[in-house]
Amino acid sequence: MPVREPESMNELVYFTNRTLDNKGLAKVWVYRQDCPKCGKAKMGKPVEKGKVKIRAKEYVCQACHYTVAKEEYESGLTAQATYTCPGCKKSGEAELPFKWKSVDGVKALKFSCSNCKANILVTKKMKEKGESDKEDE
Ligand SMILES: [Zn+2]
Ligand SMILES: [Zn+2]
């Protein structure tokens, strides 16, 4: 299945656009999913007084208020990526589980180039971002 480029940050749980070694590039995003209980709304971070609590540790359905812990919810999602491979310079796309793996002591999303099989790593950013950043951790 070809990946679908996101149109709005509002439909995403995660988005990042990175420059990699050797002029490689990686763009990774994860779509929000419908509530598994009622299917009427997308799961999202809780909203309080009109503001999204981006650092909340859970996701909530806006319709039925079904709540799932952040890690449990996110680990079931699928990330999509487009990239320019730092190894062979070919561009491609990938789908991968939205699971952070420890690579040399750093949390990273990992997938491999469909052409040369080189590992492509997108490391997790530390807590230093504003509320609008999707990489809030
Ligand atoms: Zn629901
Ligand atoms: Zn490659």
Image: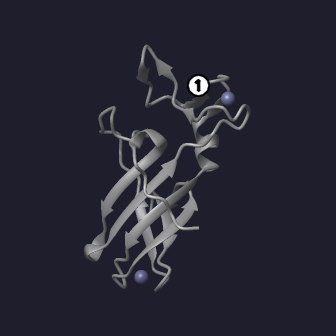
**Residue 133 shows in the view:** yes
In this rendered view, identify the residue nearer to me: 125 or 93: 93
The image quadrant that residue 1 belongs to is: bottom right
In this rendered view, identify the residue nearer to me: 8 or 124: 8
x%, y% of residue 2?
53, 67
Residue labelled 1 has its Cβ within 8 Å of some atom of ligand 1: yes
* Residue drawn 48% across the image and 59% down it: 4
**Residue 103 shows in the view:** no
x%, y% of residue 112?
50, 74
x%, y% of residue 103?
48, 63
Amino acid of disc 1: Gln
User: Relative to 93, does residue 64 appear above or below in the rendering?
Assistant: above
User: Relative to 99, does residue 83 appear above or below in the rendering?
Assistant: below
**Residue indicated by mark 1:** 62
Task: Point out the image quarter for the C terminus.
Answer: top left
* Residue drawn 38% across the image and 61% down it: 27
Image quadrant of ligand 2? bottom left
